[in-house]
Amino acid sequence: MKFKKGRYRFVLILPSLGMVIKLPFIRLFKAAAAFKTCVMQWDSKWFTTLMSYGIDQEGIVGFRHLLVGGIVFNWREFIFSNITGNPFLQPTYFSLFGLINIQKLGAECLLEKDEFWCQLREITSHLADDDGHHFRKPENFCFDGKNLRIIDYGNKKTQLVVTECGAKIFESFDPSPDWKEKRAEAAQRAQ
């Protein structure tokens, strides 16, 4: 068993069972501090900041985001995986209302970061730029057989990119280090 810590969730990796378990962070102390800060400042946007799920323009994290952000991402992954059936998604088998997710385990993606990002940008015609936080990092992906799959897809921006380009990435991604040369050769033959 391995353990990884993400921004919003803990991940238990269970190779013997072929699955991962995702558990959300619930940041009570940070949420209490955010609440206190907003109440003490008491400006016109305090209520909006408290109730937001995201991070505002000044970098202030919302109260609800600190408490239930990981739960929301878990639940979105489960729903998105089961409704779309997109082949690019590493399947999420089960969710207990976002409190616990069970996802299929894939082989870790160990590709070099810049080459990985360059290829994803090319395949998606730069649509991956809309969610660089997720698509730049090979650790947010795995291999299931020869195919690249995304394992962290609870964010709405990520889901938009997957909806538009997921099947294309699944079919086109080449994990070999000479993918640029192969594409150039294919383009020359097509002419």
Image: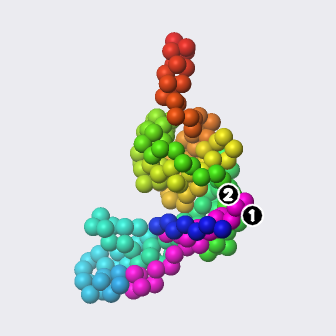
Q: Nearer the viewer, residue 138 or 70?
A: 138
Q: Residue at x 35, y 84 (%)?
A: 33
Q: Which of 180 and 74 is in front in this view?
A: 180
Please say if 139 is above or below 99: above
User: Which residue appears farthest toward the right when viewing the image?
Assistant: 17
Distance from Cα at disc 1 to Cα at disc 2 = 9 Å
Secondary structure beneath dot 1 equals loop
N-terminal label among 1 and 2: 1
Residue 185 horizontal side relative to residue 85, left or right: left
- The residue beneath circle 1 is 17
- The span picked out in magenta is 8-32
Q: Which corner quadrant holds the N terminus? A: bottom right
Amino acid marked by disc 1: Leu
Q: In which quarter of the view is residue 81 placed?
A: bottom right
Residue 157 horizontal side relative to residue 94, left or right: left
Tell me where residue 133 appears, x and y as whole percent: 43, 54
Tell me where residue 45 appears, x and y as whole percent: 29, 75
Q: Do the residues labelled 1 and 2 touch (CB within 8 Å)?
A: yes
Please say if 170 is above or below 131: above
- The residue beneath circle 2 is 105
Residue 35: tell me if it is visible: no
Please say if 147 is above or below 97: above
Q: Which of 160 and 30 is in front in this view?
A: 30
Q: In which quarter of the view is residue 175 placed?
A: top right
Residue 4: tell me if it is visible: yes
Amino acid marked by disc 2: Leu
Q: Does the magenta stretch include residue 160?
A: no
